Image: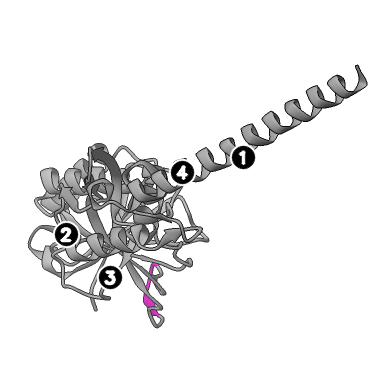
Amino acid sequence: TRVQVGQGRAGKKKKNTLLAVGIVILSVLLLWGVLAAARWQYWRIEKIEFFGIVALEENSLRGTVLKELGGWYLGLFPKDFYFLISKKNLANNLRKSFPGIQKLKISKDFPNKLKIEITERELFGILCEGRRRTATTTESYSEKNCVFVDSEGVAYEDAPKSIGRLIPKIDTDEEIAEAGAKVWKENIIGRFKEASEASRLLTGSPLVGYQLFSKIPREIRAINSEGFWVYLNVEDNFRQVFDRLKTVLEKEIKEKRPLLDYVDLRFGNKVFYKFKK
């Protein structure tokens, strides 16, 4: 009886051993199959299509994607294997590399294609550090750097310090945020647009440049296309403000308009102005 029990246990142990060996062999074969499938070119990204590109360079975008998809995971799985591609990681990498991207949508098209839809930021103007103007004079400092800023107030790319008046320029005495960061908490760009449109409609001259000061954050200094400055409060009703300016230009200043240095519209119904020396 003891011999039979011993033989039964030995047989069961042998079966368990064979089962374990079988599982190991099956796992190895399965892993080998997965590795073989992952390395098969059929499942690896070969086509990358971009949509919506305007100012960004497609070759640079493609190079960033290919770099992200290059190499191997643990030396076993290629990063361009269709089923292992993380759209979220790829999107984050593209946004970090190209702050000019406002919106991004990535889709995988089975078995080896990526589609990338991009919405670029809408350029508003150029933001520069280091220049300010007081009520009586202009104090100039060396401009440290300039960046393009979009209609939402996001600084997103290095810009030339001057390109004439084709694009509005904003000067500030504060340090500019890093690329991709929002410069102002409030919609200051929206206020710029409203002021410029009111100036254009009521005086015939849109605003082409702006100055902001950290010590007087509720004020805007703007220069119009005629070359004279306009001092404003951020909270003003710009239609009313420029309507008052229109009246002053037509009834008081008249033909001396080209001689204007600045007009101060910050004090309600009172309008102060100064001519160039």
Task: Find out whether the residues at labels 1 and 4 contact each other: C-beta distance under 8 Å.
Answer: no
Expressed as whole percent of the image width and height from the top left, the position of residue 143 reads: 38, 78
Q: Is residue 142 magenta?
A: no
Q: Which mark is residue 159?
A: 3
Residue 223 in view, yes or no: no
Expressed as whole percent of the image width and height from the top left, the position of residue 232 reads: 34, 51
Disc nearest the viewer among 2 and 1: 1
Magenta range: 135-140
Q: Amino acid at mark 4?
A: Leu
Q: Earlier in the sequence, mark 4 or mark 3?
A: 4
Real-space Cα separation, disc 2 to disc 3, in angstroms: 13 Å
Disc nearest the viewer among 2 and 3: 2
Q: Earlier in the sequence, mark 2 or mark 1?
A: 1
Real-space Cα separation, disc 2 to disc 4, in angstroms: 50 Å
Q: Earlier in the sequence, mark 1 or mark 4?
A: 1
Q: Earlier in the sequence, mark 2 or mark 3?
A: 2
Instruction: Identify residue for label 4.
Output: 29
Real-space Cα separation, disc 2 to disc 1, in angstroms: 60 Å
Residue 256 in view, yes or no: yes
Instruction: Identify residue for label 1.
Output: 21
Q: Which mark is residue 55?
A: 2
Q: Earlier in the sequence, mark 2 or mark 4?
A: 4
Q: Looking at the image, which is closer to me, 34 or 18?
A: 18
Q: Residue at x 29, y 44 (%)?
A: 104
